[in-house]
Amino acid sequence: MSKNYKSKIAGVGSYLPEKILSNADLEKIVETSDEWITERTGIKRRHIAAEGEYTSDLCYKATLKALSDAKMKPEDISMIIVATSSGDQVMPSTACVLQNKLGLSGIPGFDIAAACSGFIYAMSVADQFIKTGMFKNILVIGAEILNRYVNYKDRETCILFGDAAGAFILSRTDLSDEHGIFSTHLHADGEYGDLFVLPAGGSKIPFSKDVLDKNLHYVQMKGREIFRHAVRTLTVCCKEALEHNGFTSQQVDWVVPHQANIRILNSVAEYFEIPQDKVIVSLHETGNTSAASIPVAFDMAVQEGKIKKGQLLLLAAFGAGLTSGSALIRY
Ligand code: ACO
């Protein structure tokens, strides 16, 4: 294995569908209130994909922005990885659909299923391919249309999720470059798999009329337990990333966490004694967009002038599985 390369972020982009579902809109659908949702989650609104708009369409729009940011053309991409749990279809992969939409052929593309940690998993995989010298520019995307798997009669889940896509172009650079990924760490705890499930549609429960009658095509969540695990795993992941690289939390310019619940983010910030205004928060605008959440939050923070080149960034995620992971990056 070559030891002469590392990966850096050459471009970022994101896309949020036009249609907005506000807390006030949800008050008309389920027994809830803007006050409850804001206080318990921090979410104010989420973006919802239009009819006829697919996950690959969201990916395509985010990709064009990331390519423009990187000053690259689609032909410069050497591999595509899409992190999603709500791709266009089970087969083919959304990465392959996207490849065709970008007018590319021949380069490899595949999807990664690690729920809300998917983007960190995808980044880590891309990082390995770049470090070995096998590929030069890898398109890494997190994209979801989870609202199509949400039961709008279940007030505990339907208030949480939104649709979005976020894209990074990870590019090969020399070890001497100050910019780049210092480390990625990935984890999973399958024993907690029942805390967040989409029961039907796989080989265990194929689609049938019974599935529709019993609402098994919608996500099911044990929110309180996930909350507890989320605080613990995010804290462990952040600690691991910092200790592995010999940094303290005070040296981090921005933490970019998975955007699930403001109370989870505040608890993690408190543990690390990181001021809350050093934690990137976009969930008030997007809700939980699962695999898309980190790259979307990242891109929004770049657009707002918060995240700047040269800063030290700690990305951390948790999700169904339960999966978790981190990336420490000099942008
Ligand atoms: N509006 C009003 N009341 C509600 C709503 C709502 N939308 N949802 C639940 N409630 C009620 C409950 O019924 C309960 O009432 P009760 O006390 O009479 O029984 C009360 O509010 C409190 O319910 P809790 O479940 O204790 O509420 P909590 O403070 O834990 O908040 C929440 C719930 C927001 C879901 C929180 O637990 C959470 O964010 N968990 C993490 C969820 C998550 O991150 N999931 C996605 C990750 S998994 C992935 O990979 C996609």
Image: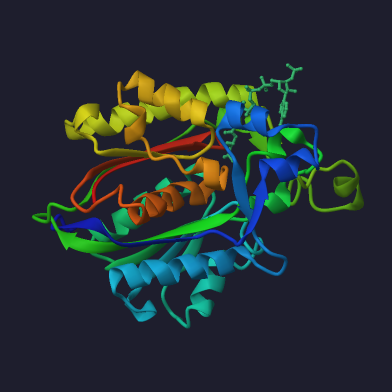
- At 41% from the left edge and 46% from the top edge, which residue is drawn? 120
The residue nearer to you, when weighing 75 against 30, is: 30
**In the image, 151: left or right of 19?**
right
**In the image, 240: left or right of 228?**
left
The residue nearer to you, when weighing 271 against 302, is: 302
**In the image, 321: left or right of 168?**
right
Q: Does residue 194 show up? A: no
Query: Is 94 above or below relative to 102?
Result: above
The residue nearer to you, when weighing 176 against 275, is: 275
- At 50% from the left edge and 26% from the top edge, which residue is drawn? 263
Q: Position of residue 28 (x, y in %)?
A: 80, 42
Query: Is 183 above or below relative to 6?
Result: above
- At 30% from the left edge and 47% from the top edge, which residue is drawn? 306
- At 55% from the left edge and 65% from the top edge, which residue is drawn? 58
Q: Does residue 76 show up? A: yes
Q: Position of residue 103 (x, y in %)?
A: 48, 83
In the rendered view of the protein, which quadrant contains the N terminus?
Answer: bottom left
Q: Quadrant of residue 314?
A: top left
Q: What count of labels does the image hold?
A: 0
Query: Is 72 above or below relative to 285?
Result: below
Q: Position of residue 52 (x, y in %)?
A: 70, 69
* Quadrant of ligand 1 in image: top right
**In the image, 93: left or right of 275?**
right
Query: Is 245 above or below relative to 97?
Result: above
The residue nearer to you, when weighing 230 against 130, is: 230
